[in-house]
Image (cartoon, helix red, strand yellow):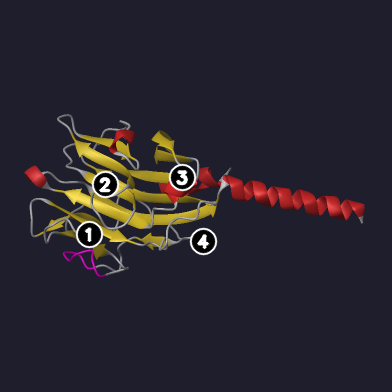
């Protein structure tokens, strides 16, 4: 089983059972267990408010007071102080930008409602709410929450999956040649990437929009893991071949 499949399998086991475990190479992990239910997400585990022109903040809730099937403990839900929207960002170990020689896997669990409002989770560049971003974007559109992906330009949108009131594992995989979106281990969209664009992304963010009284669903177990990219693996292979050749000569 390759690394990509192993991660998907581990994340799937985490839904409704246990929090996603961190590996030695995990850059960032937040299961929100050290947050306080009813409080803002900001100020804990380096989450900060993303400027949207208002004072709204993402809120922590818990399954004890508001059950979300398939989730355990605290999770991100809704906003405090507004019926509009809020966003929070985190550098998540990516200060200075992604390393184009690596592949990054961002995963989380999401209880997606069938009457959801707009929710975005993914990679951000800078602090502008309209800056380049790579996200899975669940939007309400008459027939419920649809998952789209947004790349560095809005024209990169690709329609995917429809919210169904259950909990699923979402993943975004980014390397210097492509972006891939997965839901429960199944590819649902993506597009091209290049090293220069990849290096612009310097953290992650969550956005919830509660306009119209809709709920944007519940987010938990956010994890960012780097893996050697294709070019790096090719380089390691070449070095290993050269070493074998030298040993053969000796």
Disc 3 from disc 2: Cα separation: 20 Å
Judging by the rendered image, the residue that carries numbered circle 1 is 50
Q: Is residue 193 visible?
A: yes
Q: Are marks 1 and 2 in contact (CB under 8 Å)?
A: no
Disc 1 from disc 3: Cα separation: 29 Å
Image quarter of the N terminus: top right
Q: Which mark, residue 8?
A: 3
Q: Residue at x 70, y 48 (%)?
A: 237
Judging by the rendered image, the residue that carries numbered circle 4 is 25
Q: Is residue 13 visible?
A: no
The span shown in magenta is: 36-43
Q: Classify residue 9 as left or right of residue 43.
A: right
Q: Are marks 1 and 3 in contact (CB under 8 Å)?
A: no
Q: Nearer the viewer, residue 147 or 23?
A: 147
Disc 2 from disc 4: Cα separation: 25 Å
Q: Classify residue 35 as left or right of residue 8.
A: left
Judging by the rendered image, the residue that carries numbered circle 2 is 120
Q: Earlier in the sequence, mark 1 or mark 3?
A: 3
Where does the image place residue 196, in percent across and percent down from the top left? Answer: 46, 48
Specify whether residue 41 is painted magenta: yes
Q: Secondary structure at mark 2?
A: strand
Where does the image place residue 167, in percent across and percent down from the top left? Answer: 30, 44
């Amino acid at each position: 089983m390759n690394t990509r499949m192993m991660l998907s399998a581990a994340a799937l086991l985490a839904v409704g059972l246990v929090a996603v475990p961190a590996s030695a190479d995990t850059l960032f992990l937040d299961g929100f267990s050290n947050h306080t239910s009813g409080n803002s997400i900001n100020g804990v585990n380096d989450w900060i408010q993303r400027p949207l022109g208002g004072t709204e903040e993402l809120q922590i809730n818990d399954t004890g007071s508001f059950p979300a099937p398939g989730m355990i403990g605290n999770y991100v839900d809704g906003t405090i102080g507004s019926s509009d929207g809020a966003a929070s960002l985190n550098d998540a170990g990516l200060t200075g930008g992604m390393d184009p020689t690596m592949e990054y896997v961002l995963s989380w669990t999401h209880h997606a409602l069938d009457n959801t409002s707009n929710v975005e989770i993914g990679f951000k560049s800078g602090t502008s709410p309209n800056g380049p971003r790579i996200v899975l974007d669940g939007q309400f559109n008459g027939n419920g929450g649809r998952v789209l992906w947004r790349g560095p330009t809005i024209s990169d949108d690709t329609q995917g999956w429809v919210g169904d009131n259950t909990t699923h594992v979402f993943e975004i995989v980014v390397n210097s040649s492509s972006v891939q979106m997965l839901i429960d281990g199944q590819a649902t969209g993506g597009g091209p990437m290049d090293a220069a664009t990849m290096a612009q992304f310097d953290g992650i963010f969550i956005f919830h929009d509660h306009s119209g009284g809709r709920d944007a669903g519940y987010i938990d177990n956010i994890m960012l893991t780097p893996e050697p990219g294709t070019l790096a693996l090719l380089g390691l292979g070449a070095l290993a071949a050269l070493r074998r050749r030298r040993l053969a000569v000796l």
